[in-house]
Image: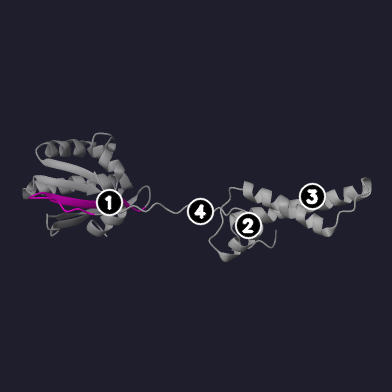
């Protein structure tokens, strides 16, 4: 077991443990055959028995292997199926500009800790992708949900004052999107402000969508 180092994959570690167990078991089996059955098993037959047992154990393991030549050579030499980690799913993420006179608002909020210094910011863009306005603000000590929800409410108030009544809200927080769609509750610290925001939204043409963080970072707050 001391031969296992940090370069050994979980599947190789399982294999080493199985090899030790099967080697000890085969030695015990050969000694018993020689003493009680008068059957002298040769070294070659003993090694074949060990390898067969290791192969059976190795193919029953669900541990994963590394994509290294070491793993490939050892596992293949024992006829063991290599359990590579499945490839990650790759999803294309795209940012789409608004159409016509619509103004698209991308925003983000964050807090340093479950309760910590928080803030947020937003960017307003037109159908050509031009930046019409942007802002950032500090929210004092709150949690991340407070920052994520307080930011769009500030953006909506700003858009209303400017006269942008046709807006598209987009963020990377699925929880905030659910709150806007009526599938979640606003935190109590923002409840009164949220109710006033809902009144403002009813007087506007407003839609909201979710976008992955990788694209929101390019068009929202970097």
Mark found first going from the N terminus, 4 or 3: 3
Q: Could you say whether the residue bearing mark 3 is in a helix, strand or loop? A: helix
Which stretch appears magenta? Answer: 95-112
Q: Position of residue 113 (x, y in %)?
A: 38, 51
Mark closest to the chain's N terminus, 2 or 1: 2
Residue nearest the observer in this picture, 165 or 145 = 165
- Is-magenta flag for residue 109? yes
Q: What residue does disc 2 label?
A: 12
Q: How far, Cα to Cα, is label 1 from label 4?
A: 34 Å
Q: Mark 3 highlights which residue?
A: 25
Point out residue 68 in the picture as x, y percentages from the top left corner: 55, 64
Residue pointed to by mark 1: 109
The residue closer to the viewer here, 51 or 178, is 51
Q: Which residue is mark 4?
A: 85
Please report contact status of discs 3 and 2: CB closer than 8 Å, yes or no: no
Of the numbered discs 3 and 2, the one sitting upstream in the chain is 2
Q: Quadrant of the N terminus?
A: bottom right
> Mark 3 against mark 1, which lies toward the viewer?
3
Marks 2/1: CA–CA distance: 44 Å
Structural crowding at the residue carrying mark 3, measured as other residues with C-alpha within 10 Å and reported as few (<14), some (14–19) or many (≥20): few
Is 210 on the left or on the right of 7, as rendered? left
Q: CA distance from mark 3 to mark 2?
A: 20 Å
């Amino acid at each position: 077991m001391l031969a296992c180092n940090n370069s050994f994959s979980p599947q190789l570690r399982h294999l080493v443990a199985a090899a030790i167990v099967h080697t000890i078991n085969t030695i015990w089996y050969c000694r018993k055959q020689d003493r009680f059955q008068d059957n002298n098993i040769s070294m070659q037959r003993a090694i074949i028995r060990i390898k067969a047992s290791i192969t059976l154990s190795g193919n029953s393991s669900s541990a994963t292997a590394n994509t290294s030549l070491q793993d490939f050579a050892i596992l293949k030499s024992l006829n063991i199926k290599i359990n590579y980690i499945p490839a990650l799913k790759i999803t294309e993420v795209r940012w789409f500009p608004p159409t016509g006179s619509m103004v698209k608002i991308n925003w983000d909020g964050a807090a340093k800790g479950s309760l910590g210094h928080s803030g947020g910011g937003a960017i307003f863009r037109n159908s050509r992708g031009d930046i019409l306005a942007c802002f950032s603000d500090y929210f004092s000590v709150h949690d991340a949900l407070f920052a994520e929800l307080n930011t769009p409410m500030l953006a909506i108030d700003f858009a209303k004052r400017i006269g942008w009544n046709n807006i598209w809200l987009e963020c990377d927080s699925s929880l905030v999107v659910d709150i806007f769609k009526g599938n979640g509750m606003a935190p109590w610290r923002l409840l009164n402000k949220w109710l006033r925001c809902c009144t403002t939204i009813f007087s506007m043409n407003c839609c909201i969508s979710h976008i992955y963080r990788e694209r929101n970072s390019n068009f929202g707050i970097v």
